[in-house]
Image (tube, coloured by chain):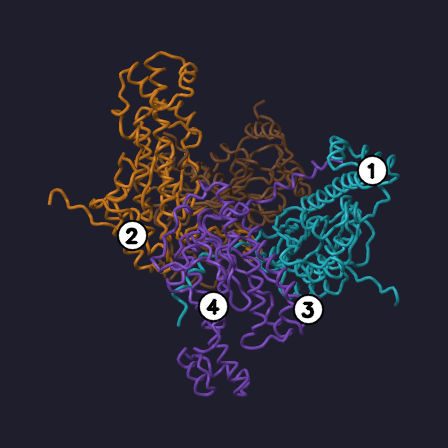
Chain colours: A purple, B cyan, C brown, D orange
Amino acid sequence: MANSKYEYVKDFEQSDPLLPNTWIVVRIDGRGFHKLSDRYHFLKPNDRRALDLMNAAAVAVLKDLPDLCIAYGVSDEYSFVFHPSCQLFERRNAKLVTTIVSTFTAHYIHQWGTHFPDEPLQSPYLPSFDGRAVMYPAVQNMRDYMSWRQVDCHINNLYNTTFWAMVQQGGMSNTDAEQELQGTVSADKNEILFKRFGINYNNEDAMYKKGSVVYRQYQLEAAKPTPEQPSEGEKPAQTSRSQQDKLQKLRRKAQVVVDHVDIIKDDFWEKRPWILSGKPGKLPVESGA
Amino acid sequence: MANSKYEYVKDFEQSDPLLPNTWIVVRIDGRGFHKLSDRYHFLKPNDRRALDLMNAAAVAVLKDLPDLCIAYGVSDEYSFVFHPSCQLFERRNAKLVTTIVSTFTAHYIHQWGTHFPDEPLQSPYLPSFDGRAVMYPAVQNMRDYMSWRQVDCHINNLYNTTFWAMVQQGGMSNTDAEQELQGTVSADKNEILFKRFGINYNNEDAMYKKGSVVYRQYQLEAAKPTPEQPSEGEKPAQTSRSQQDKLQKLRRKAQVVVDHVDIIKDDFWEKRPWILSGKPGKLPVESGA
Amino acid sequence: MANSKYEYVKDFEQSDPLLPNTWIVVRIDGRGFHKLSDRYHFLKPNDRRALDLMNAAAVAVLKDLPDLCIAYGVSDEYSFVFHPSCQLFERRNAKLVTTIVSTFTAHYIHQWGTHFPDEPLQSPYLPSFDGRAVMYPAVQNMRDYMSWRQVDCHINNLYNTTFWAMVQQGGMSNTDAEQELQGTVSADKNEILFKRFGINYNNEDAMYKKGSVVYRQYQLEAAKPTPEQPSEGEKPAQTSRSQQDKLQKLRRKAQVVVDHVDIIKDDFWEKRPWILSGKPGKLPVESGA
Amino acid sequence: MANSKYEYVKDFEQSDPLLPNTWIVVRIDGRGFHKLSDRYHFLKPNDRRALDLMNAAAVAVLKDLPDLCIAYGVSDEYSFVFHPSCQLFERRNAKLVTTIVSTFTAHYIHQWGTHFPDEPLQSPYLPSFDGRAVMYPAVQNMRDYMSWRQVDCHINNLYNTTFWAMVQQGGMSNTDAEQELQGTVSADKNEILFKRFGINYNNEDAMYKKGSVVYRQYQLEAAKPTPEQPSEGEKPAQTSRSQQDKLQKLRRKAQVVVDHVDIIKDDFWEKRPWILSGKPGKLPVESGA
């Protein structure tokens, strides 16, 4: 029974490679997490268990895919960044995005019980994520994307922190709190927090204020100007397969860490030049050695 | 702290709607399931637990997304079919594919323990899936796609059944079995099975021979010619939102079933006209009523 | 001097095949024809010379590309239709569109002097056209596209005929005519034409009222129901190269004609089944034979 | 007669914007110019009239589209380059490509008679061109593209010059010349030219050896390092409409020139920084002032 009669249907598949030498950002978002966070009693404004679970899943994704150079997460979203020189899956869009979404989901579900021991998952109400890829041609564009997400994190967290203080500690209704906050600027919210509730926003948890940055850890370097679009990235076809494999192995040796720091200013990137260069740094000296 | 300075990065997002009035097939495949099936000791040639788990996850996906009209699974792959009139997520490619991949993965991981009570998942070696969407303009193209998968199922299963009989029952080495099977046709394999091992391939489990078909169950109808590309599908913009919502509700009432039958001949489709028409059929009369 | 150092730049080219088994409509539009029609003194509301020139260029395109099955033109736009079974240029989007745009432009410029003997082209103010391709999965979608253009032709021509009668014969200012026509329906315009200017719109030139249809002429057939999406179109991969070549030769023998008839109703398509079937009809018997 | 019934067909149009902040290269190629050059008796290995006509058409395209920053032509092909900051037609792929192809074709046909006074165009055998767009993320990628074309020009011209000398002056058959040249390197060909035909390849016309570079002329600047990807290019959304308009006006004032120089080394680009920066330079001082 030959299958040739039907094989023409393969002609309908369309190739979807992403443009070479561009930064690829795959952003995933929780599906219907508003409802989901109610069902599983997420704490407001931030649920540490939920964020730790997001971060754990993101770390697993970075370990699984050494081509990823950095990721940034806030709330129920996570952005994963491939270097311009990345050749994984021949840069096929759907393959890259679905691999990240599925790997992230698998670890999120698998580790749920560890982070939410008292909130077992109730089928069919399982967490899931959608995702998409965006290309950024210049390193500045990619960094501006990351800055955009971190500024968004700040704006939302300041709002949510104030809102829930007014509701939870101030006894206001959701509607009243919402109304009072309408049109306020950052200074207003800081003042509400401090004067009414004795909360100094600066002392809030860095994870809530800054979000979570995930990357491979090497020895920090002295800050120097951000490297330009790396030259090897410009000629992606010329990085040989064996070179790529060697780099992968080096990357697998590095530890994947979660940080809650500013990624808008240059400092973060200058001290960790391996993120933008795509070349592994020096492994940190073992503290016990 | 306004975010407008960085918001230009949103301009790099590219829209990806799939062409209206086409059948959308989202096919997902297990990542590295060869290795994975070794790690978790899947039985050869078919592991009923693994297939039941695949089917359970597929059923959950169909229940979650009433826009899906049918799915077909074999081995570690599953194909999900959206009707040409589907407007879900404005037919955005990445959104449709990642939602299916993530929902499938979530249920697969969540139900793993039920199907593999003796093989707990070992992080980081978790099952995951990639996926992609293909558009088929004509109903015949979509049916030919389904036929292609089912013929593939047959070819592979006959081969694997024979191969593993030769190895497991016949005591041959993998290499020897492979060599002997090279160049054989179906009749040869049937004969090997029957003469050497007393196996009548026809009596093998239908799930292994035919794969698994998942769809919503309504009252079967008398077989009549396959309906043409349905007319409402041709003018997708004209199905009103409220009509769509009404159809969705009707679909949610139907039971999602798993079948192991021929989907190449017309009979299957003619008796279940709701699959190709996209219009819900009559709910089956309750047997106990 | 080897060129291999730079050849990696070819990797940035992205393939752009259009989905198999869909109708491809390439629509071209005059660039800045409002200004251009002033410069070369096009008559209002319709300039026969300009329309004849458009039609002559369209006929040349159909003769050059036998894969085209029909074209429809109105004003400074023309829509060219490829059959779902078309394999020209492997259905590459840019190649199909630019070939039509360039061939059309070449003939338009070359024949300008024949149609506008008293209006020589003044460089750099040359006519040019842009274009794009749209895919239609079902024959009904493609026919609805054609109907859309012909209805548009009717609406615009009735408006323009009335407007210019009011201005040219009625001595009204453009603004006054525009204002009076605002909110009027077809019947109102017909009445203005007839009562004020003695013009019976039905007697206007069919080319102005119906636009221009260009196709290959074979023996008309008795009207019978429109054929469904033709079966050979559904399996485009299976039409052999030599069959395609044979069809091309037959098509080249047919005369390309320009008609000004209704293409909304079924009659036009039923009498000319070769347009939708993609199979050449019988050549008309020579009248002189 | 409302048109709303058919307007749904517009939903099948798919948007095709090119990625922001990338160099856009639109390359056009003559269709069937091998045959065409025979029909109109183009001289071998180079026909000055044909190249002058190509260049004249390219100059007209640059004058028409001030967003173009440079073009490079050789034989029957021309590559037009838009700056990363270009917003023309919202960077729509088909619109950009077809506008260039059509404008080029229009001028090519219109000026044919000037360049080929003794070879009138014979309908339907008219020259036409196809085209496509390719995006290059980094300035180095774009320059490598240009270098690739110029190296190709050199390789082909050296071959063709030698081949036609052997045939036209040496009296060899095409086949014999082809055979002898197989496997030769540049030095071999230079030697054949010099020893057998007294031709010093270095003295050949620069247009034939280097191809043609078309750009806007401003005051040359002292060579300094090539500017990096210009910063304004990185945030294309932030160049205001009025700024864009102002730049366009400045560009229209500059003369468009045709040059036959090396564009592989840095010198060309360093002396003409406006090409890569996208910012108009200083207009040259009028010689008569």
Label 4 element class: loop
Tell which subunit mark 2 falls on.
D
- Please name the amino acid that badge 3 sits on: Leu
Q: Which residue is mark 3?
A: A121
Q: In what element is the residue under mark 1?
A: loop
Question: Where is residue B218, by image quadrant?
Answer: bottom right
Task: Give neighbour class at mark 4: few <14, some 14-19, many 20+ (Cα, 10 Å).
Answer: some
Kindly identify which residue carries mark 4.
Answer: A260
Label 2, label 4: how far apart the Cα atoms are: 45 Å
- Binning the other alpha carbons within 10 Å of mark 1 as few (below 14), some (14 to 19) or many (20 upward) gives few
Specify the label residue B170 is tagged with.
Answer: 1
Q: Which residue is mark 2?
A: D248
Secondary structure beneath dot 3 equals loop
User: What's the CA distance linking mark 3 and mark 4?
Assistant: 28 Å
Q: Nearer the viewer, mark 3 or mark 2?
A: 3
- The amino acid type found where label 2 is placed reads Gln
Camera-side residue of D48 and B151: B151
Q: Is residue C227 left or right of residue C51?
A: right
Residue in view at x 39 percent, y 33 percent: C3
Q: Quadrant of the C terminus of chain D?
A: top left
Question: Distance of mark 1 from mark 3, alpha carbons?
Answer: 46 Å
**Residue at screen point 87% across, 40% down:** B200
